[in-house]
Image (spheres, grey):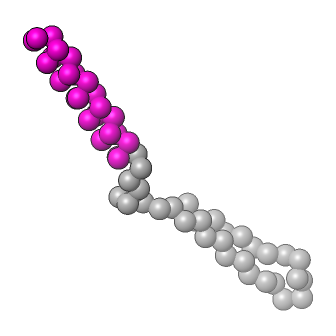
Amino acid sequence: MRNNILGGLVIFVVVLTCLLMLDDISNVQNQPVEKDTVLIEQIEGNTELAIVEDSE
C-alpha cells in the first residue's frame, strides 16, 4: 500500500513539473522583443545607393 502511494506521488510531481515547464516555455510575455530597424537614405542624383545602419 505504501509503495502505491509513493509511486503515485512521484508521478504527480513529475507531471506537475512537466506542466509548469511547458507553461513557462510557452509564456513569452516577460521576454524582451528585439526589433531590427533599418534606415534607408536616398542620395541626391543617384537612386541606386542606400545607406543601411544597423543598431545593435
Whole-percent x, y for residue 19 in the image: 32, 39
Q: Is residue 12 above or below residue 54?
A: above
What residue do we see at 59% from left, 65% from top? 36
Figure check: 16 above or below 26: above
The residue at 74%/81% (across/down) is 41
Residue at the far front in the pictured view: 1
Q: Position of residue 32 (x, y in %)?
A: 42, 60
Outermost residue, left side: 2
Q: Main secondary structure of the magenta part?
A: helix
* Left or right: 11, with 24 as reference point: left
- Extreme residue toward the bottom, this view: 44
Quarter in which the N terminus is drawn: top left
Q: Which residues are the magenta region?
A: 1-24
Work out whether residue 30 or residue 39 is closer to the camera in this orientation and state it.
30
Please tell me whether residue 20 belongs to the stretch shown in magenta.
yes
Q: Nearer the viewer, residue 42 or 19?
A: 19
Image quarter for residue 52?
A: bottom right
